Every structure is written in structure tokens, then in C-alpha cells.
Amino acid sequence: MQWYVVASLLTLLTSSQGILTTLSQSNGGYKYDYATIPFLAEIFKLLVSSIFLWKEFKKSPPPRMTTEWKSVCLYPIPSIIYLVHNNVQFATLTYVDTSTYQIMGNLKIVTTGILFRLFLKRKLSNLQWMAIVLLAVGTTTSQVKGCGEASCDSLFSSPIQGYMLGVLSACLSALAGVYTEFLMKKNNDTLYWQNVQLYTFGAIFNMGRLFLDDFRGGFENGPWWNRLFNGYTITTWLVVLNLGSTGLLVSWLMKHADNIVKVYSTSMAMLLTMVLSVFLFNFKPTLQLLLGIIICIMSLHMYFAPPSTLLELPVAVAASQGVSDKTDS
């Protein structure tokens, strides 16, 4: 399957996540324990990956699997990074308002590009760097509210701790993605074996979170497994299915494409969510949203289009560039 097909599916699924989550609410709240959603999504991803791995075992030759402990012990690290990232997110929200937090979250687009270059040694052209910065600018523009609103002047009025934690959150998010890509590409193991390792540890960490929630609540509502499916509806199960499928697509992109493709997919998904909210939730479109979409589309074209299509080169240079593009592909 081509990477752009998977990226398009990821964009559609990611854009529907927020919509499904909103639809799963009842009277503005959740009747289910939302901490069970990531746990069940990890179980779903683990089951799907195990089934595909079992099917590969029935083929000849069998799939490549590295089982040495020094390799397996690397797979809990992304879960640990995400665990720290989630706590930093909550800490950030104690210092900044939601709008500022969302805007600062776009820093992960740039930090992903930087870590992508530093740790994976992947060279980006100047044009691609400009496209990445444009993507961050476009997503930020789409989220900026009108100056008639009270939150307009709050972007630079938060304590310095909030901005420092926001930068740390962006770096941790980028680090988790870049490290996961490193794991996926460090050897020729089958994707499904790598997924089984990732999602096993992911399920364990999410289960630990459920135990911790019970402990903090004094087991007032009983152990988590007794209320695992309480309040679940068809929409809630769609949220689980969506989150699990999104994770599987991301792992495929990490194996066969790269983090930058994932960043573009999730960024475009955010814009698509805003557009769909206009029709589903009476969200009022703004000029900032329109400008943000235009900037992001320009960024997308700048990053992935061959340089020869972006510049009016002399005929001889364009011909040689076309031969070079074909050779690279």
C-alpha cells in the first residue's frame, strides 16, 4: 500500500476522533470511565497485530523476529515517554488557558523536524524546513481567536513556567514519535512483531494507570475491571475502534514512511475536524481558519512536490532535475 493512501486514512480517522468523542458524551459529560478507552485501544491493536503475525507464521519463510532482551527492553521506552508527556500536559494546563495550550502544541511540528534531523540523521532541504515552519504557522493561525474575545490578549500573559512546560511537552511528543520510528526501522523485523511488543507494554502501562486511579479513589467504585464497560454505547466503541485503528496506521507510517508524513496527516486532520464541526456542531468558521487551511495546503505542496515543479528552471536544468527525480525514486 502506498504511504499517501495510509496518510489519507490516518487524516480521516484522526479528524473523526474528536467528533466521535464529543458525540459519546451525555449531558456534557462521560458516563464511562474515559481512562478505559486507551487501555481497550491498546488491547485492540495487540489483538489485530497478533492475528496478522500468526498469519505470517503460516507462510514460508517465517517472519523475521528479534527476541533478544537487549532489543525487547527498548520497547517500553515510548510508553514511558508518553506517560511523562501526559503528566507534563496536565501541569502545563495549570499555568496557561486552553487556547494558549492548543497554540503552543503546534511547536511539536517544528521540534519533530529538529529531532528527526538530529537523531535519525535525515537531511531536509531548506525548502522542506520552510514548509515545516509554514505548517506550524498555518495550524496556529487557524486556532487564533478574534481580538474581540477575552482570550485574545492572553497568549503572552501566562507565567513563564507555562511556556517552559509547553516547550517541554512539544519536545517529549516529538521524541516519542522519533524514537518509535527508530525502533521500527532499526532492523528488518516484521511490523507485526514490533507492534506486539509496543502494544504489550502499552497495555501494561495503561492498566497500571487504571490501578493508580483506583488507588487514588480509595477503591470507592470497586476495581476497574468490574466497571470496565460501564456506560459504553455504540459510539463509545467507535471511539475505541477509531483510536486503535489510528495507532495501527501510525505504526505502518513509522515503518514505511516517516514522522514528517505523520505530522502532516495529524495537522491536516485538525483542520478537517474544524471544517466538519461547522456542519455538525454549528461551529462558526473564521477568517483565521480559512487562512490557516490555505497556508497548510501550500506547506503540504512545498514539502512533498518535486523541486522542479516549484521553480521555473531553464529547460536544460529542468530536464536534468527530472532525470534526477526518476533516479531517486
Image (tube, rainbow, N blue to C red):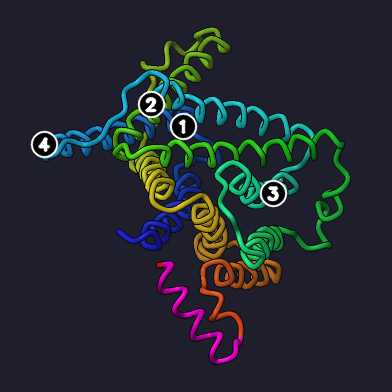
Residue 139 in view (yes/no): no
- Badge 2 marks a residue whose secondary structure is loop
Quarter where residue 301 is shown: bottom right
**Numbered badge on residue 107:** 3
Q: CA distance from mark 1 to mark 3?
A: 33 Å
Q: Which range of residues does the magenta coloring cover?
A: 312-328
Q: CA distance from mark 3 to mark 2?
A: 37 Å
Write down the residue under mark 2: 230
Residue at figure coordinates x 60%, y 31% from the top left: 86
Spot occupied by residue 99 in the image (x, y as percentages of width and height): 72, 49
Write down the residue under mark 4: 58
Q: Decide which of 35, 41 is in the foreground and name it.
A: 41
Spot occupied by residue 198 in the image (x, y as percentages of width and height): 40, 30
What amino acid is labelled 2 in the image? Asn
Image quadrant holding the C terminus, namely: bottom left
Labelled pair 1, 3 in contact (Cβ < 8 Å): no
Q: Earlier in the sequence, mark 1 or mark 3?
A: 1
| Mark 2 crowdedness (10 Å alpha carbons): few <14, some 14-19, many ≥20 | few
| Mark 3 crowdedness (10 Å alpha carbons): few <14, some 14-19, many ≥20 | many
Spot occupied by residue 271 in the image (x, y as percentages of width and height): 57, 61
Residue at figure coordinates x 43%, y 67% from the top left: 328
In the image, is residue 215 part of the stretch drawn in magenta? no
| Mark 1 crowdedness (10 Å alpha carbons): few <14, some 14-19, many ≥20 | some
Mark in front: 3 vs 2: 3
Q: Earlier in the sequence, mark 1 or mark 2?
A: 1
Labelled pair 1, 2 in contact (Cβ < 8 Å): yes
Labelled pair 4, 1 in contact (Cβ < 8 Å): no
Q: Decide which of 46, 275 is in the foreground and name it.
A: 46
Q: CA distance from mark 3 to mark 4?
A: 45 Å
